[in-house]
């Protein structure tokens, strides 16, 4: 889950980064209710296996189970990765390599950021030091114009 926002009294619009569909927005009806079965599986910055069906405006969430992929990763790292994904990726652009990179992450946010930006074409050179990596990441932010 890359992010979420409230919709009505009990629903959420989730932003998910999936391997097959890329970045998508999903309508999760009634998940904010205290009796909702899916409420604990749709947390921000968590990995989950979800079942979606196409809707008129958004995909619709009909099922979710927790995934083992992100159990060893710190939430702060995932929050930073989610920010990068939201900023640099457009809706429905499939990037399976970036999804794999995120699911195999070791918690090094600078390494993930640099590899993701390089995969998207923003970097193009290898960092010679941690300070050089920081400069490359900052330059990608400036050049993105987003």
Image: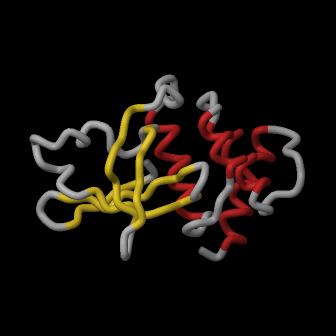
Instruction: Choose top left, top right, bottom left or bottom right for residue 127.
Output: top right
125 displayed left or right of 63: right
132 displayed left or right of 46: right
Front residue of 123/60: it is 60
Front residue of 121/30: it is 30
Front residue of 61/71: it is 61
Query: Residue 126 location in percent, x, y?
Result: 88, 46
65 displayed left or right of 115: left
Placement of 102 over or under 86, stated as above or below: above
- Give the residue displayed 60% in from the left and 53% down from the top: 20
- Give the residue displayed 62% in from the left and 64% down from the top: 88
Instruction: Choose top left, top right, bottom left or bottom right for residue 63.
Output: top left
Front residue of 13/82: it is 13
The quadrant of the image that shows the C terminus is bottom right
Q: In the rendered picture of this protein, how many numbered marks are placed on residues?
A: 0
Query: Residue 89 location in percent, x, y?
Result: 61, 64
- Give the residue displayed 45% in from the left and 39% down from the top: 49
- Give the residue displayed 40% in from the left and 63% down from the top: 59
């Amino acid at each position: 889950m890359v992010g979420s926002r409230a919709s009505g009294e009990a629903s959420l619009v989730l932003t998910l980064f999936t391997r097959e569909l890329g970045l998508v927005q999903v309508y999760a009806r009634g998940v904010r209710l205290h009796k909702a079965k899916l409420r604990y599986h749709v947390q921000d910055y968590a990995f989950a296996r979800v079942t979606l069906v196409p809707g008129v405006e958004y995909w619709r969430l009909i099922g979710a189970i927790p995934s083992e992929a992100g159990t060893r990763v710190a939430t702060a790292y995932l929050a930073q990765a989610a920010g990068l994904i939201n900023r640099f990726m457009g809706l429905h652009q499939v990037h399976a390599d970036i999804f794999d990179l995120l699911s195999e992450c070791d918690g090094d946010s600078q390494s993930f950021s640099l590899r993701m930006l390089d995969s998207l074409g923003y970097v193009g050179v290898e960092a010679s030091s941690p300070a050089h990596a920081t400069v490359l990441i900052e330059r990608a932010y400036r050049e993105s114009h987003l």
